[in-house]
């Protein structure tokens, strides 16, 4: 016969506290010292105890919810309000929750090092947590504090994830530009703390080296103004650049603005390819060729994992990205998904 699952009584015995104290710690309620809380959490980890999230929610009178966590790296309104990625994540999560009694809650962390906020969110979690490109250290902290977590970006081998083929998409973008006749293909990479940005950088570098092309690189945060500044620096240092692969559409829109402000034409002088296929790509002038990232589909899949309640450690699902050709690279036709 299989080994029985540990109970709250087992945790209380291992931590040498009462069952009521264990309940307070699990529900992040007052009445336990930091030392006791740490002892209870250590006992839960050692026993592999996973609280029944539905029972916890009912007992505490809380509404069951899926928490969507984003790192804002600054004011919430400035970051979440201006970046289309998060609206697409929320659209996917909301779609997956239709017909259920589960709500969606947005949790914004101003810093990836705010572990106190991570602990508080994890303690209040009921159905589970979807991490929207949360860096490794914070993601692992969530995983330690709440086992019902799914990331939308690659973090660690133990973290369940539904991710996009970022590296393959970047590689395909460079190949497409090369087939279009471009030979001096630069890149504007995203922030180093983002797993998505690092994978896109890896795909770009692999393609450049396979094709024997020179490497021209700048980087910035996933913001329009960073793309604008990076493109200016690129063209000032390397006026021979004839194409730019940019880590996200918002940055790519800024890059287009910078290129045209410098008196060069897109795509005649410099072709531009973004990544995401967000509203920023459609609204750019000219509209952006981009790698479509299936954000909504990823969010739906992650949410359904949480609703099903069966998330294996190290679960991985990788969805393909697709080239969408628009005016920023000139006329052409899309290639097959990667």
Image (cartoon, rainbow, N blue to C red):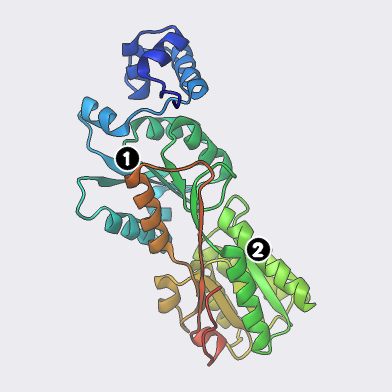
> Residue 201 bears which disc, if any?
2
Looking at the picture, tell me which residue is in the foreground, 315 or 70: 315
User: Would you place residue 9 above or below residue 217 in this image?
Assistant: above
**Coordinates of residue 102 in the picture (x, y in percent):** 24, 45
**Coordinates of residue 124 in the picture (x, y in percent):** 33, 32
Disc 1 packing (10 Å; few <14; some 14–19; many ≥20): many
Instruction: Using residue 155 as the reference point, say whether residue 39 is left or right of it.
Output: left
Would you say the residues marked 2 and 1 are in contact, meaning their CB atoms lie under 8 Å apart? Answer: no
The CA span between labels 2 and 1 is 34 Å
Classify the position of the N terminus by image quarter: top left
User: Would you place residue 48 above or below residue 282 in this image?
Assistant: above
Looking at the picture, tell me which residue is in the foreground, 4 or 294: 4
Query: Under tag 2, what secondary structure?
Result: helix
User: Which residue shows up at 64% across the image and 83% down it?
Assistant: 177
Q: Mark 1 points at which residue?
A: 127
Tell me if residue 81 can be seen: no
User: Which residue shows up at 68% across the image and 84% down it?
Assistant: 178
Looking at the picture, tell me which residue is in the foreground, 37 or 54: 54
Query: Which is nearer the N-term, disc 2 or disc 1?
Result: 1
Tell me if residue 43 can be seen: yes
Query: Under tag 1, what secondary structure?
Result: loop
**Coordinates of residue 58 in the picture (x, y in percent):** 21, 30
């Amino acid at each position: 016969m299989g080994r029985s699952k540990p109970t709250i009584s087992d945790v209380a015995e291992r931590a040498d506290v009462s069952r009521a104290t264990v309940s307070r710690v699990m529900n992040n309620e007052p009445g336990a010292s930091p030392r006791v809380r740490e002892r209870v959490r250590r006992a839960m980890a050692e026993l592999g105890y996973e609280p029944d999230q539905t029972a916890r929610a009912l007992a505490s009178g809380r509404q069951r919810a899926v928490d969507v966590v984003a790192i804002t790296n600054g004011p919430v309104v400035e970051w979440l309000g201006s970046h289309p990625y998060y609206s697409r994540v929320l659209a996917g999560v909301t779609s997956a929750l239709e017909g259920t009694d589960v709500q969606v809650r947005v949790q914004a962390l101003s810093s990836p090092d705010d572990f106190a906020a991570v602990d508080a969110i994890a303690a209040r979690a009921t159905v589970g947590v979807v991490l929207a490109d949360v860096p490794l250290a914070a993601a692992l902290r969530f995983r330690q504090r709440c086992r019902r977590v799914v990331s939308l970006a690659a973090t660690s081998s133990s973290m369940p994830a539904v991710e996009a083929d970022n590296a393959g998409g970047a590689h395909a973008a460079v190949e497409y530009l090369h087939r279009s006749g471009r030979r001096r293909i630069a890149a504007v990479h995203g922030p180093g703390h983002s797993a998505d940005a690092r994978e896109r950088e890896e795909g770009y570098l692999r393609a450049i080296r396979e094709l024997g092309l020179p490497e021209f690189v700048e980087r910035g945060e996933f913001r329009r103004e960073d793309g604008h500044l990076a493109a200016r620096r690129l063209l000032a240092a390397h006026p021979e650049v004839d194409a730019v692969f940019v880590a996200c559409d918002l940055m790519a829109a800024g890059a287009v603005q910078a290129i045209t402000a410098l008196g060069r034409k897109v795509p005649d002088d410099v072709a531009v390819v973004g990544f995401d296929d967000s509203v920023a790509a459609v609204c750019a002038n000219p509209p952006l060729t981009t790698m479509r990232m299936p954000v909504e589909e990823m969010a739906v899949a992650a949410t359904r994992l949480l609703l099903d309640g069966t998330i294996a450690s190290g679960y991985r699902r990788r969805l393909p990205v697709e080239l969408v050709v628009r005016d920023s690279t000139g006329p052409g036709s899309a290639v097959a998904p990667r």
